[in-house]
Structure formats: C-alpha cells, structure tokens
Image: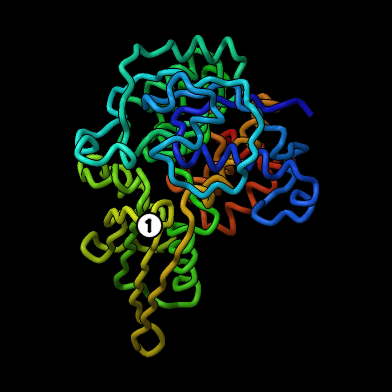
Amino acid sequence: MRKIRVAIAGVGNCASSLVQGIYYYRDPQRLREGTGLMHPELGGYKPADIEIVAAFDVDRRKVGKPLREALFAKPNCTPVFCPDLPDIPVTVQMGPVLDGVSEHMADYPEDRTFVPADEPPVDVARVLRETRADVLVNYLPVGSEQATRYYAEAALEAGVAFVNAIPVFIASSPRWAERFRRKGLPVVGDDIKSQVGATIVHRVLTRLFEDRGVRVRRTYQLNFGGNTDFLNMLNHSRLKSKKQSKTQAVQSQLGEPLPGEDIHIGPSDYVPWLNDNKICMIRMEGIGFGDQPIELELRLSVQDSPNSAGVMIDAIRCTKLALDRGLAGPIEPVSAYFMKSPPVQYTDDEARRLVEAFIRGDAVAARTQAGD
C-alpha cells in the first residue's frame, strides 16, 4: 500500500500520542495482538502506513525543532509509551497564532502553558503542497475558531483532505461541507471521540436507558484533568462550541431532548498534578417501571491523549480510503462513528455498522457518505 502522508496542526499531547502509536504498532506482535486498536488493518492500511510529512505549532519550544524532539517538549505531559522514536525528517514550522492561545495562559508556569514563538508564520497551504500531504489533522486548542478556519482554508487551497479533531464546526457546517465537496476533497469531523471516553460512555448509557424503557430525567457529566486542554478551557469564553458539541452528542441518543436545566455536560476544572489523566463523573437519574426511580453514578479514569489517538489512527485511514475512492465532502459514516458533532447523528451501533460497511466498500455506505 502507498503511505498516507499526514500533516498535523498542533504538536501537543494528542499529536504525541498519535505519532508514538504509529511507531508502537510497527512491532508485528503488537499489531497481531491488536490491543488498543479497533482495526489493526483498515482497508489495507496499517498504522505504520501513516507517515508524518509536516507539522505546525506556535510554541517556541517546538517551532524549528525536529518533530521527534517537539513531541516530548513542554508543556506536553502525555505518557511516553514509545520512547525510542526514530528520527522523523520533519521540522515543526510556525503556524499563525490567531486565536490559538488564550490570554489567561500567560498567568501559568511555562512548563504548563503555551509560550508563543516570536516568528512569522509560514504559508501553510504552500507547505502542504510541497510536502504532498494527503490529510491535514487539526489538533489545535479548543476555542481556536479563527485558526481552525485558517487551516481548513489552507487544506482547500492545497487540495488536501481535512480531519477536524476539535469542536469548531467544519464538517457539520453546510457551507464548509459544500466547499470541500466542490473541491473534490473529503472532510471528517467535528470533535473527536475517545475510544472509551466520557462522551461515548455517556451516549451508550443514555441509549441503554432509552432502549430499556427508562425515561432519563436529569444527567450531568463532569470532567477534570491536568493537561493543557483543561488549562485552556478554564477560559469559559472558549467553551461554547465544546459544551454544544458534547451536549448534542448525548442529547442525540434521546427520543426527546432534555430541557437545558436538566442536562449539564462539560469541562469542570484543571488539576495540574493529574497531567494527562482525565477523570470523568457521570450521574443519570431516570424513571423506570411503575414510575420508580433509577439512579446511576460512574467514575471513569483514562489517559486522555492516547485514548483519542486510538480513534484518530482509524479516522486518518478512513479519510485516505475516501481519497482513494474519489469521495468528497463530509464522510458521514466515518464522522458519525469517530466524532461527537458529525453532520448526521446515529446511535453508536448504527454508526459502527455504517463505518464497517464503508471500510468494506459496500454500495449502501458509499451512497450514505455521499449524502444521497
């Protein structure tokens, strides 16, 4: 198989976990065992077929550095599970700052926060063309609305597919969707789920209540952690799209959405010593048979960035399959299964069935993803 040539916007914890994973699963035994992978092989592509060809960031400890070094530079704090990365022939280049760095980040120690480099940004579209990238992955901080649109524009200009891992609405925006469709480019988004994370667990439990005849009355999901994502989200003005994305992901599993005062989903606090460990608390209150109460409380602890990288490694390979097949616009089955805010919401069972059909190349999946 040909390599999947990937460019990354944002060399943070998620990028570190993704790249570590690409090399970690080059080990034949690990690939054969498949632990941590939903698809050891996907459409003929293995994780090792992903090749990073460009990377962009704004932090002075990363810009101008070899990618291998930048992946482990502060403020990154994700677990190092593949310490022996080879030399990757990619130097991190300066992207535009725009709204990518929240003002409040300057109030925290440098080891915990972003430190913007004093350099002019490169022409991202030009770099994408020169490196012959197939896919651009957007890993910018939550709330980076302008910066995400800049990278989406660069992908369109350069003729590169786009995978949007954050809650800025690109694939789920009719205007952006049509622009990618007209350009003949796939787009997958928005806001990546984790393999077993807060959103997927909450969705499955919500669907369980519904399917078993229990009416959900109230629910909350509280999340806290110690990585830069949680520090960034202390600025609540950057959380509008994040809360919307996570809330609609759960509401979509209900026959009748809950009133706003009865559902609370979103980031809650930043605890530095947790580093990349994310803690999620879910509570659900329902009414069952004979109008009797049912209550559920759950605590989930995960390493946040590897948890999402396990999904991204599939999202990238599915996007390359879409390119190989000449598909354009939002790839609906892929977005529905891997993202919190896809253009069309399905139950997770249905989304999984559709994405497996897409991987196989079934005609019904091709029609679904093309929006027919």
Which quarter of the rendered picture does the C terminus lie within?
A: top right
User: Is disc 1 surrounded by few (<14), some (14 to 19) or many (20+) residues within 10 Å?
Assistant: some
Instruction: Please provide percent x and percent y for residue 222.
Output: 32, 62
Instruction: Please provide percent x and percent y for residue 334.
Output: 58, 42
Instruction: Please provide percent x and percent y for residue 17.
Output: 54, 43
Above or below, 218 against 257 in this view is below
Could you tell whether 365 is left or right of 116 in the image?
right
Q: Quadrant of residue 168?
A: top left
**What residue lies at 31% left-to-right and 25% top-to-bottom?**
116
Could you tell whether 342 is left or right of 35 in the image?
left
Name the colouring of the figure.
rainbow
Q: Quadrant of residue 154?
A: top left
Q: Kindly identify the amino acid type of the residue bearing the numbered disc 1.
A: Leu
Total marks drawn?
1
**Can the viewer see residue 361?**
no
Q: Which residue is mark 1?
A: 274
Above or below, 39 against 286 in this view is above
